Amino acid sequence: MKYFRFSCDTNILISSAFYYRFKTLPEIFREGVVYDFSIFTMRYFERILGKKGIKFGILPPSTLKELNLIKPKIILKKLEERFSNDQVKFRKALNELSSLLNRVNDNLKRVLKIFNKGKAYINDNRVRKIYKKVDNMYKNFITQSINMKEEIKKKVEDHINNFYARYFQNMEAYQEIEEAKETALQTQIIRLSKKNKTVKENDKEILSEIIYERKRCIQENTHFRNNLNFYFITEDTHFSRKYNKRFKIFSTPITTKIKELFDIDSVRAKQFTELIFNKKLNLER
């Protein structure tokens, strides 16, 4: 079994520090809530650190910087999610925001102990070279996204021929289904063409630093050469796969390309928790 290291984004870190009641795995998988997966992961590695003295987590400087900058904004968003149906409790929580921030800060200090601080600073020339590759990758995806819906329509039209037509009375309905399915498969790319879904510079910097951290791990530990899985836990669709409920399929072109180019496994919190549950992680060193 390969060795592993992992990193995570700011949302995962704050999710793990915002809720306090520890839940069992069956509860978590039944409810399927991101913050429950996050808190389980952090508490799990907290116990591993206590038993083995090993830190499997690595946080790059840009993540730590972003953590301090957007913490209040994320906390407010999570309050809105938690109390969306109860305005009284929401207003009460707002009045106690200062106290809440202190509790979250205390919990974050506890969570951050399971991570080593990374050494990949974005101004380092070695990291900037990686950033250029990451930036070009997303530029190529954005270019693809502009005309992708028209390309999908043409692809489906070419695919449908007289053989298929014999079995479908309504060709338009069939074509609509096939286009929707292909669109679902390409959701990661298509979303990039929307103004509010563009990839932030800071996200590209964080990914670049994580890629460098993986390289550094291998350089510093000969056991890791050709034998290391590096996981990036994130719920951002421009990193990790997007599930489509209608067709029960995942959109993965960006996730696949990140793995292909940089050997980084971008996973959602639930995916990483499943690795723990199924004992797929090598906890030896």
Image (tube, grey):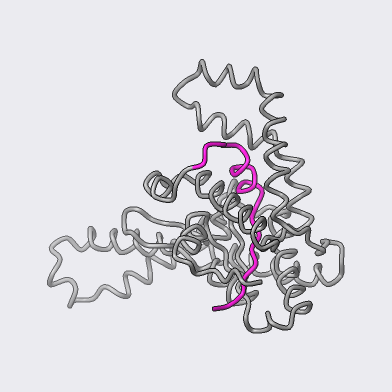
Q: Quadrant of residue 263?
A: bottom right
Expressed as whole percent of the image width and height from the top left, the position of residue 239 reads 58, 60
59 and 196: which one is in front? 59
Q: Is residue 95 left or right of residue 164?
A: right
Name which residue lies at 58% across and 66% down: 141
Name which residue lies at 44% across and 61% down: 149
In the rendered structure, does residue 271 fall within the stretch colored magenta?
no
Locate the N terminus and report the quarter of the image it occupies. Answer: bottom right
Number of dots carrying numbers:
0
Q: Is residue 75 left or right of residue 253?
A: right
Expressed as whole percent of the image width and height from the top left, the position of residue 82 reads 50, 31
Name which residue lies at 82% across and 61% down: 122
100 and 196: which one is in front? 100
Expressed as whole percent of the image width and height from the top left, the position of residue 278 reads 44, 65
- What residue range appears in magenta? 1-22
Q: Quadrant of residue 216?
A: bottom right
In the rendered structure, does residue 6 fall within the stretch colored magenta?
yes
Query: In the image, is residue 183 above or below residue 103?
Result: below
Q: Is residue 244 left or right of residue 239?
A: left
